[in-house]
Image (spheres, rainbow, N blue to C red):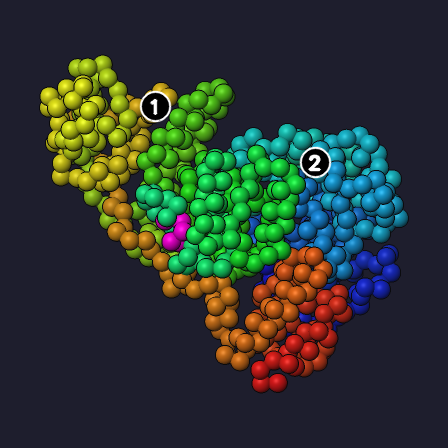
Amino acid sequence: MAPPAGGRPAPAARFSATTPATRKFATAAEALHTVFGYDTFRGDQAEIIAQVVDGKDAVVLMPTGGGKSLCYQIPSLVREGTGIVVSPLIALMQDQVDALTAVGVRAAFLNSSQDSASRGQVERDYLAGNLDLLYVAPERLSSEATKRFLDQGTIALFAIDEAHCVSQWGHDFRPDYLALSELADRWPDVPRIALTATATDATHQEITSRLQMGDAKHFVASFDRPNIQYRIVGKSEVRKQLLSFIKTEHPDDAGIVYGLSRKTVDQTAEFLRQNGINALPYHAGLDAGLRARTQSTFLRDEGVVIVATIAFGMGIDKPDVRFVAHIDLPKSVEGYYQETGRAGRDGAPANAWLAYGLADVVQQRRMIDESPGDMSHRRKLSAHLDAMLALCETVHCRRVNLLRYFGQTSEPCGNCDTCLQPPEAWDGTVPAQKLLSTIVRLLRERNQKFGAGHLIDILRGKETPRATQHRHTELKTWGIGADLSDQQWRGVVRQLLAQGYLATSGEYGTLILTDTASEVLAGSRQVQLRTEPDRPVRSAGARTSSKKAAAADLSPEQATLFESLRVWRSAQSKEQGVPAYIVFGDATLLAVAAAKPTSIGDLDGITGIGAKKLEAYGEALLEVVAAGPGA
């Protein structure tokens, strides 16, 4: 959870580890300060929390890192009873509960990973009113036995996390979420809050309809993540490109690399390991125990890079992920946004890096053509891909394009590759006509269709065994495209596919013309193409490792103290077996280093230090500060 904005909290610390189990907070502001160590809410948080505290429903669309969890955690600390959190993330429930327990919240979970003794204790705690929050999976909540059990206690609210899973328009559809519509009928007086970090208008409407939340108040925050720099590069030797990106800009940083296939994931992780990167693979084909250990390593250790399919990442609350890289084209803008949003949750600079090429477009088109769904389903997939291609090929600000997809407007950001180094547009009408004419001639004169590689060979006049075999040197278009390089022609093909003048056909991705191509051939439609930058765009901030960037505003003495605090935190996290951010986030350690507190009273005013952490770590923090430079 990223810290809300605000200054020094007013003194208030009536909650401690020894507070009676029956306590509830009088106000949301008191819970925010006492438990979480902050004094003001961000954005719509205060209004959302007031809505739920008052017993009313809410639908919340808020970006990753925007503080969604507070919107149900704090009402659960104020309202009588236990907040029931519906989460699809069984593997992460332990970490979520650990983070809450560390700040003094009485939290637990019920899932299939527990033995009977553990489940029994949680059930007794719930029935006795000794839990503020209880996490359950949608599969468990859909059972009648679980519903009868919950009926025996007092429910403060239902929080439906990752609510886009209820929507078949979404990219993480979970059928068990559909049963959650019954919550309104069974517990009509219990407020519900549905939350997601990504939703188009269609997904938003389906969430509302399927969960029967027509009377809910809707809160749609800005989807802008200004600390993330979006960059899309042309794909050549993608593993070498990725390695250069990580070594140049993110040495020793935590990051996530996404690939479409398990084979790609395994090979890329091995390549990175061979080149000195602490990389681990993660996909559904690996043993469940290994996946759990990999996820735990990523959360608890620093500088780990996970190479994964989209099976990894939803619900990951690691705040210091400095980059998310895609080495294959994502299937939708919604999926891309969700995945890139896992970078920079702490608000510090982060990169979203994507390598994209012609083969990606051909592969995605073929996958859609071979999809088992009906024509309507394939049209939806095509629309998702078209939007993703538009983002990749735009000559304008990527952030403007991305936010427009979610129905929001913005000005050019100045922090994406197309803003930092605007690409030039050029008139590609004649090259397009040459390519389209070659496809037409092959089909009409020879009844032949070919993929991009051979068509480019024909245009460039490259004599190959295939060209000789089929007598393509006799074609009128033979060699008429020698003025463009092979790479330039591949860019032309890719952009014509993206703009809808070309389509792919069959198992081998042969190229065919669409209806609009005739306008280009007739000269009645101009084709504008983008020129790719000669070199990758990097910002000064991106070349700085996360640790250096974090300490950039400190004096040398304070920066040294910050590193000492990080070492202390690392030792604490290893001793307790929890991720470092559960002890303290970097933002809190930076504040401690800057303030150099000398008393418990001084610590009480530092953001991120609530009553429980003040009691648990206060004296130890003061000892580190006292032993630091200038002490």
141 relative position to 169: left or right: right
In x, y percent, where is residue 65?
Answer: 57, 54
Residue marked by disc 2: 138
Q: In terms of secondary structure, where does tag 1 sit?
A: loop
Q: In terms of secondary structure, where does tag 2 sit?
A: helix
Residue located 56% across and 30% down the image: 168
In x, y percent, where is residue 570?
Answer: 63, 64
**Where on the picture, by quarter, is residue 22?**
bottom right
Residue located 60% across and 68% down the image: 566
Q: Which of 309 and 205 is in front in this view?
A: 309
Residue marked by disc 1: 508
In x, y percent, where is residue 427?
Answer: 19, 40
Q: Earlier in the sequence, mark 1 or mark 2?
A: 2
Height in image: 430 above or below 109? Answer: above
Q: What stretch is highlighted in magenta?
A: 241-245
Q: What residue type is labelled 1?
A: Tyr
103 relative position to 274: left or right: right
* Callout 2 crowding tier (Cα within 10 Å): few <14, some 14–19, many ≥20: many
**From the viewer's perspective, is the residue at label 1 or at label 2 nearer?**
1
